Each structure stands twice: as C-alpha cells, then as structure tokens.
Image (cartoon, grey):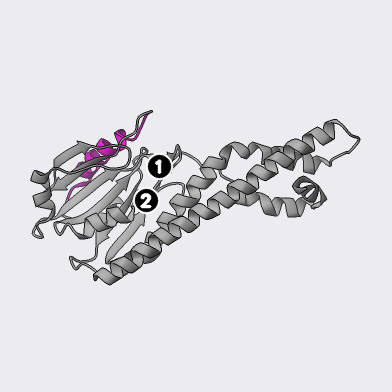
Amino acid sequence: MIIDKLIACSPVKLNSIAPKFQMSVPIKSGKDIFEKSCDVIFSKETFEKAKNIVAKTVRGNDPKESVAIIMNNKIIYQGLGGETSVNVPKEIQKFLYDPKNKIAILHSHPAIQKHFTQSFSFKDYYSLITSQGVKKMYVVNSNGEYALFEKINNQRPENKTISKYKKLYYDSMQEAVDLANEYLKFMEKIHAELKAGSEKLNNSDIKYSKEQLEYFTKLGEKYHELSDLRAKVVVKASHDFWDKHAKDLNVKYRANFSYL
C-alpha cells in the first residue's frame, strides 16, 4: 500500500516528494512591467484606467470577460462579454483592421481557480495578428496583473507556421492537463491511504515517528489544493509556451502574474 511505502521512507525521501505539491500561492501584485512596454500608443494614466475597467469585471461571484480599446491615448470602446469571450462591435472593428492605427486592446480573463488566470489563448493570438491596426494586446486578471503581446512588426507569419504552432500549443496544453490529472489521481490515492493509515493507527499498536506523523498531516492538508494544482499546471503551460515561442510567431511576450 502507498502509505506503507511512505512509512518505510526516510524523512529525507519524504521531503523530496513534498515540494511537488507545495501549492500555497500568495495573492500579491506582480512586478510592474509597464515601462518596458510604454510607447506613443498611450500614457500610463490611460493604461491604468483601461486596466482597472477590465479587471473589475472578473472580480466577485459572477466574473465576466471584458475589453477596453485604446487609440490615440483614448479609450474608444469598453464592453462586457461572457465567461469565456467578449466581442467587439463592427463599428469598432474597422479601426482594428486599419494598419495606419496604433491600437492597444486590454481584455480580462476570469480565474480558472481563485488564484490562477490563463495567459493568452491561441485564439487571442490569432485575433492580434489578423488585426493590422492592433499593435499590443493584454490579458488582465482581477488583481490587475497582466500578460502582454507586442507585435515585432506588422508582418503576419505564413499560414503553415501558424498551423504548426497552433498544433504545438494545443498539444502542450493537453499534455499539461494529462499531467495534472495524473497528479490528482496520485494525490487522491495518497489521501485514501492516509485515511486507511489513520484507521490502522487507531486500531493497532503501530507507532509512527514524529516526522512521519508530521508529514502525513501536511500531506493531508494538501488534499484540498488538488484543484489548484491542476489549474496551476495548465496556466503555467500556457505561459511557458508563449515565453518560448512568441518570437517565432512575430510577437514579444511578457507577463507579471505573481504565481508564475
């Protein structure tokens, strides 16, 4: 049984397992990266105003995506969407497609869990590169932290390149989900064995060491974080993909999410 194998482990071996499941996440604002992305599109004051508009809609018990669009240092549109998407009306879309414009789009993503916000989806990326007037795109979370796409130039990658990386993106996301589910199954088994071990302890003369008991207690406390574990693995996979491949797709990528 799993618990018997854990009991047989030395404290050193037990501790070597534990860090994989350290999922306590501080809620704090990530380092500001605005100055690294500042240009003539907007002032910091306009950026902060737009950021606060979209961040507010993903707070509370009924979070919704929203968008704020900046052009000529003014917010020309703000709109509320649903749980997974937000649309822009046709009268605003014409500005997005005009290559003469320098537009920044900020939109919010609701948290997968209370701590974790997904970075850009591939759909977000495709929206950026097909909108010639949009130079920057931001994903904002409820804390005002954000990820940034910035076009290197207005040249769209070839379709075969886009298709290649689209497949790679979804494959990496699926791999992350599969890995997360394996962690969940493993933790659920451990939890079951911990429960069985507790019953064994209460009904026998077995004596566990202080270190073993402390480890079992800590491991049991991690059970309620299973959903956080799955969420973090997935959002980290999204961030890692763009951090590694964004330049191959003609965009710069940065993020200041505090849980990364």
Mark 2–mark 1 Cα distance, whole angstroms, equals: 16 Å
**What is the number of the mark on residue 29?**
1
In the image, the segment drawn in magenta is 42-60
Q: Position of residue 201 (x, y in %)?
A: 83, 35
Specify the principal SS of the magenta part.
Answer: helix
- Identified at 24% across, 71% down, the residue is 158
Instruction: Name the residue at the top extreme.
Output: 61
* Left or right for 202, reference 223: right
* Occupied quadrant, residue 173: bottom left
Residue visible at 52% across and 54% down in the picture:
178
Residue type beneath disc 2 = Ser
Name the amino acid, label 1: Ser
Q: Nearer the viewer, residue 27 or 83?
A: 83
Quadrant assignment, res 237: bottom left
Mark 2 or 1: the one toward you? 2
Q: Residue at x 63, y 51 (%)?
A: 19
Left/right of residue 127 with respect to residue 211 in the rendered view: left
Secondary structure of the residue carrying numbered label 2:
loop
Between residue 149 and residue 112, name the one nearer to us.
Answer: 112
Nearer to the camera, 187 or 70 = 187
Query: Label 2 belongs to which residue?
Result: 119
Compared with 104, 156 (above or below) is below
Callouts 2 and 1 close, C-beta under 8 Å: no
Mark 1 residue element = loop
Whether 15 is drawn above or below 227: the answer is below
